[in-house]
Image: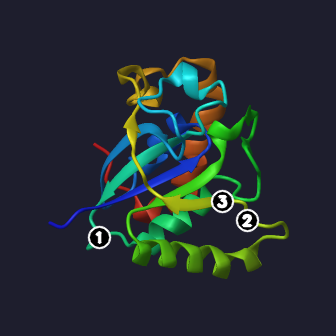
Amino acid sequence: MSEKVLVIGTGCFWCSEAIFKLIKGVNNVVPGYAGGHTENPTYREVCTDKTGHAEVVKVSYDPDIISLEKLLELFMATHDPTSLNKQGNDIGTQYRSIILYNDDAEGKVIKDFLKEHQKNYSKPIVTEVKKLDRFYEAEDYHHNYFANNQSNPYCAMVIKPEVNDFIMKHGNILKLQK
C-alpha cells in the first residue's frame, strides 16, 4: 500500500478531523498547526493570531483508493474557500483556508485545481497554497475531539450538523461504519 499525505485547513481542525476520518481511503487524520513561523506552537499561541499558523489536519491516504483530486473536491465541499480568515463564527488567521503541498508537482495540481474550480464561485477563492515547511501535531486533547466530546456545545451545534450534512451528501465515499 502506498501512502500520501495532504495537509489542509478548513477552519476549526476538530470538524476537519471528524469529517476526513469518515472517507474511504483515508488511513489517518491528525490535527495540528502549519503554515506559520513559530516553532513548536501551542493551541493557546496559535489562537493569538501571532504565530502565523493555521489549524490544519494531516490526512494520510491511499492514492489507489482515493485521489488527490477527490480529496481536494471534498476539501472545497467542507468549508467556504472564499471566506478570508473566517469559517462560520470562527474568526482569525488560524481558521484560514489553506493547502500545504509536499513538492512542486503536487503544488501545480492543487493550483490548477483551484483555478479550474474558481468558475463555481461568485467570489474569489482565497485559499492559501504554499509548500509545507513543517507540521506540528496538536496537543493530545485535540485528537478525536468530536468523538470524545459529543456533549460539548460546539460539537453538538457546529460539528455534528457539518458531519451529518457531509454523510448525507457524500455517503458513497464513506468507510463502512461498525
Numbered disc 3: secondary structure = loop
Q: Nearer the viewer, residue 165 or 123?
A: 123
User: Hey, what amino acid is under mark 3?
Assistant: Thr
Q: Quadrant of the C terminus?
A: top left
Q: List the residue tagged with mark 3.
A: 127
All told, the count of numbered labels is 3
- Contact between labelled residues 2 and 3, with CB atoms less than 8 Å apart: yes
Residue 109 x %, y %: 49, 78
> Measured along the vertical axis of the image, is residue 4 above or below residue 134?
below
Residue 142 pos. (x, y %): 43, 26
Q: Position of residue 155 (x, y in %)?
A: 57, 27
Q: In the rendered image, which residue does mark 1 sit on?
A: 65
Earlier residue among tags 1 and 3: 1
Q: Is residue 52 left or right of residue 33?
A: right
> Which amino acid, by three-letter code, is at mark 2?
Ile
The numbered mark at residue 125 is 2
The residue shown at (58%, 33%) is 51
Q: Which residue does the image show at 39% across and 48% down from the upper left? A: 58
Q: Nearer the viewer's eye, disc 1 or disc 3?
A: 3
* Other-residue count near label 1 (Cα within 10 Å), few / some / many at <14 / 14–19 / ≥20: few
Q: Residue at x 69, y 58 (%)?
A: 81
